[in-house]
Image (cartoon, rainbow, N blue to C red):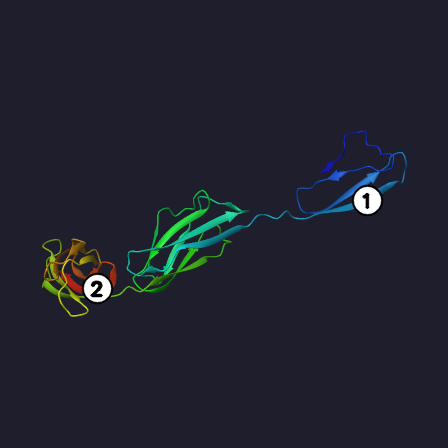
Amino acid sequence: MLIPPTGPWLTNDSGLYDLSVTNGTPGQVLVRAQVPSAPGAENNTFLNFVPVPVPEYVFSYRVTRDNSPADYSTRNAITFNLSRGGVGVANRIVITSANPASSRIFTFNPNTNGVGNNNITVDSIYPGPVVVTASIPSIPSLLPLQATVNFTEVMRRHYIVHQVIRDRSPAGGIPNQVRFTVLSLVDGMPQANVLLRFSATSEGRPSPTTGITLMDGTFTLDIFRNFVGTIRVTARVDLEPLAESNVDVTFT
């Protein structure tokens, strides 16, 4: 598009006339000038226009907490950031996964916030590195991003043994029952007042999900299930996740 000065369009005292040209797309433009009062006085000039750089998306991360204990409770933390042209991009979903898969990722909101941040925390049952992979599906040109956090080893002080009290209970009826006993790794003595956490596979329902051992180091757990089949029940010492016991019970 030609942008000439305000007329009259006359050369100045030096015989010059200034003309500005703009163009909305990159490429070459031919500008032709003629002097009507002087036939044959003309000029053809090619002007080149280059593409305007478009700001690219930048996907980055920052580890805000590292080297937490591998107690399946204390978490490391990572902040992912999406920006474009130095400005945070909001409301983009961030998909994350962890390796090893036994690690757990916690996020309050899967979307980037007003400054382009997405904050997650990670816990682990095992010491060592955990690799978190993050991607933004709505921007296919962005490659997945990997961040590594580390978990330190937790000293084991206990181990657990189990005794099945009741098995093969009717599904949807009375519970199966298992007694867990917590013992010291040092001398094998029963340990009182130890907090245990319980879980079960395949829609089994431990009741309760936490419990404190009695003076003899035991805790008796009820397990319910509405369907026929075998499930696995796990008892784990709180903040000492490798101190665990697994037992299978069956519902008929």
**Pointer 2 residue:** 244
Q: Quadrant of residue 228?
A: bottom left
Position in image of residue 128 (x %, y %): 35, 65
Between 204 and 193, the one nearer to me in the picture: 193
Position in image of residue 110 (x %, y %): 39, 48
Could you tell me how far apart the alpha carbons at marks 2 and 1 are, in whole angstroms? 86 Å
Q: Secondary structure at mark 2?
A: strand
User: As shown in the figure, which amino acid type bears the numbered disc 1?
Assistant: Asn
- Say which quadrant the C terminus sits in: bottom left
Between 149 and 82, the one nearer to me in the picture: 149
Q: Quadrant of residue 199?
A: bottom left
User: As shown in the figure, which amino acid type bears the numbered disc 2?
Assistant: Glu
Question: Can you tell which mark lies on residue 235?
Answer: none
User: How many other residues sit within 10 Å of disc 1, few (<14), some (14-19) or many (≥20)?
Assistant: few
Vertical comparison of 126 with 46: above or below: below
Residue 48 visible within the image: yes
Q: Secondary structure at mark 1?
A: strand
Question: Can you tell which mark lies on residue 44?
Answer: 1
Q: Earlier in the sequence, mark 2 or mark 1?
A: 1
Apparent side of residue 55 relative to residue 249 in the rendered image (left or right): right
